[in-house]
Image (tube, grey):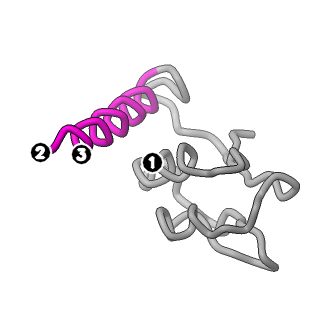
Amino acid sequence: MSSQNYKAYSSSSKSIQNLETNKFSSPKKKLGEWQVNKEQCLGCGLCESLCPEIFEMKDGKSQIKNGADFDKNKTCLIEAVEACPAKAIVRQ
């Protein structure tokens, strides 16, 4: 594994580890609800490409799909949260 790939993997692993501990939730609790701040969203579609199970584009902005399962898709959710250039994906 190259050092760049390792750094990306390491960063992603730490984010997921934080997600599973106390940074976002306790291990026994659900992740809670998330939302896309429409005023901040740039409409770039990066979140949808990283996590199509959670995000969809509507009227040029991202939104959370109805019935999205945050716990089942936590890995791609966190990737999308961290990758969002506008930091528009937030917990309610």
Residue farthest right in this picture: 39
In the shown orientation, is residue 49 left or right of residue 92? left
Q: What stretch is highlighted in magenta?
A: 1-21
Looking at the rendering, which quadrant does residue 28 occupy?
top left
What predominant SS class does the magenta segment belong to?
Answer: helix
Q: Position of residue 65 (x, y in %)?
A: 65, 68
Q: Which quarter shows the N terminus?
A: top left
Three-letter residue code for mark 3: Asn
Q: Name the residue under label 2.
A: 1
Judged from the image, the secondary structure of the residue bearing numbered disc 2 is: loop
Q: Residue at 81%, 79% (x, y): give it.
A: 59
Cα–Cα span, label 2 and label 3: 6 Å
Q: Residue at 38%, 36% (x, y): give it.
A: 16
Three-letter residue code for mark 2: Met
Q: Are marks 2 and 3 in contact (CB under 8 Å)?
A: yes
Q: Is residue 85 above or below residue 68?
A: above
Q: Where is residue 50 in the image (x, y as percent from the top left)?
A: 47, 63
Q: Is residue 90 above or below residue 28?
A: below
Q: Mark 1 points at which residue?
A: 74
Judged from the image, the secondary structure of the residue bearing numbered disc 3 is: helix
Q: Where is residue 60 in the image (x, y as percent from the top left)?
A: 78, 76
Question: What number is the disc on residue 91?
Answer: none
How dense is the environment of label 3, judged by Cα within 10 Å: few (below 14), some, or many (20 and up)?
few
Q: Where is residue 79 in the image (x, y as percent from the top left)?
A: 47, 49
Q: Which quarter shows the C terminus?
A: top right
Q: In this view, does 85 lie above or below 61?
A: above
Cα–Cα span, label 1 and label 2: 24 Å
For the residue pair 45 and 5, the one nearer the viewer reads as 5
* Number of the front mark, 3 or 1: 3
In the shown orientation, is residue 77 left or right of residue 88? left
